Amino acid sequence: MNHSILRSLACLALLGIASAGTVQAQAPAAAKLPDFTGIVQKNAPAVVNVEARYNGERQGNSRSMRGQTMPGQGMPDDQQAEILRRFFGMPMMPSPQDQKHTSLGSGFIISGDGYILTNNHVVDHADKVTVRLQDQRTLTAKVIGTDPTYDIALLKVDAGGSLPAVTLGDSRSLKPGQWVLAIGSPFGFDYTVTQGIVSAVGRNLGQRDQPYTSFIQTDVPINRGNSGGPLFDLQGRVVGVNSQIYSNTGTYSGVAFSIPIDVAMNAVQQLKSKGYVSRGMLGVTVQPVDDDMVKAFGLDNSVGAAVVDVTAGSGAAKAGIQSGDVILAYDGRAVQQAADLPPLVGMTKPGSKVPMEILRNGKKQTLEVAIGEASRDRNAMNGQGAAPSLASSGSTALGLTVQSIDDDTRTQLGLKPGQGVVIGDITGPVAAQAGLQAGDVILMVNQQEVGSVAEFEAATKGVKAGSTVLLLVRRDGQSSFIGLTVPDADGK
């Protein structure tokens, strides 16, 4: 081989041009990378943009502010972004005057007759909901039902014909490392496609308002406006509903969470059939097994859920579960940590009998437990399986209205006779900023028990600007104190 040929080959190598033999060696590795174009082309027509309108200012909570877009938020405040806004406008962005009354999210059509799945926090308390299809048709959507605990909302539109629908998959088969794909409307940019992998499954976030959900964790870029949109696997099947991100800035930071589609569809079927979602109740309070407990319980490691308390009369009590037992498995599924138990119990149909493996005094045994029904604090008064209220009133200073509760509803919620009033609506920023929600039960005001609207009015009558009111609030069977500080004339 002469020197000119050698020089030519060297130049080709420097330019990144390899020989035919080298290309053949690299081709199999490149072929393993997924091509998402087919999934997008097939499923994009079944993804919708969801717009919720409010007559007053939107009632926010910590989850909604993490999950969906408040129009205009999250865009860079630099010269380039300003030029983009000035000459091209923000896509689907309402005017600044309308921003306090609008929220945007995503959704997807689950059946050709117009049923659409999205997040509850996208449409929560909306006065009007519309969806925009890929063909640019805008349709008014009826909210069939919502479940705040699972953060699921079911919408229905009438398009005058069959609509394209997604194919549903099985989220239980997901494994860390699998490729997944999201389609949604981050910041109002419709039909944005992002991809990543499953980072973890069965992730419990330990949130007070969502203890029954084991999330799919991914590194798929998700931002405000993606909430309610679908998460697809490589077969083009929906395996999750994009719901939340973990971020200190309010924008994507590499960690996103989706509601498993089997959990979401369980809620959908119940909302269709009876208007509310039932969840199983075991009747125990559990805590993690720490290192100090491992030796005492005779465990090899810190697995399981340690039973702290057993509710009298519950299925657990009747089955013989005792304080100090460690729950190792529920209905054939291992309980690795305490947080694993609530989602498993919640998905169990009330009235079912379930085998549970426990450890007691160093010995394993299996007990059969009849599962009860969890209280529906939040669903009880929002039009989904609600019992009639006896009276209602409100507190302008605290920013909420309350309703009396009848005896049947108290029994259903696990309350004592004459105990508590339920929040009917959030009407102002004080209650909203404290995280209170419709359906929460107020048991005490400034350590004074309240059991009627009249008692609530008497307890809050002397509230003045600048004062702090301490409420004992019950939600999903758990009680906690929440302080509400009434702003002064300067709004401080």
Image (cartoon, rainbow, N blue to C red):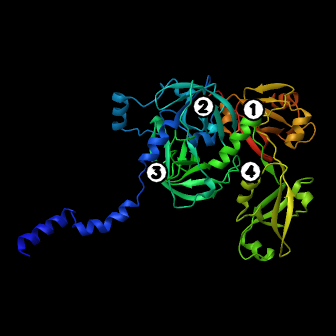
Name the mark nearer the viewer: 3 or 2. 2
Identify the residue under disc 4.
Answer: 347
Q: Distance between the residues labelled 3 and 4?
A: 29 Å
Which amino acid lies under the numbered mark 2 shown in the image of this protein? Gly
- Residue 169 lies, in percent from the top left, at 59, 50
Which amino acid lies under the numbered mark 4 shown in the image of this protein? Met
Q: How far apart are marks 3 and 2 (CA)?
A: 27 Å
The image quarter containing residue 408 is top right
Q: Distance between the residues labelled 4 and 2?
A: 26 Å
Answer whether labels 4 and 1 touch (C-beta < 8 Å): no
Which amino acid lies under the numbered mark 1 shown in the image of this protein? Asn
**Which of the two discs, 2 and 1, labels the residue nearer the N terminus?**
2
- Quarter of the image with the N terminus is bottom left
- Residue 348 lies, in percent from the top left, at 77, 51
Identify the residue under disc 2.
Answer: 114
**Which of the two discs, 3 and 4, labels the residue nearer the N terminus?**
3
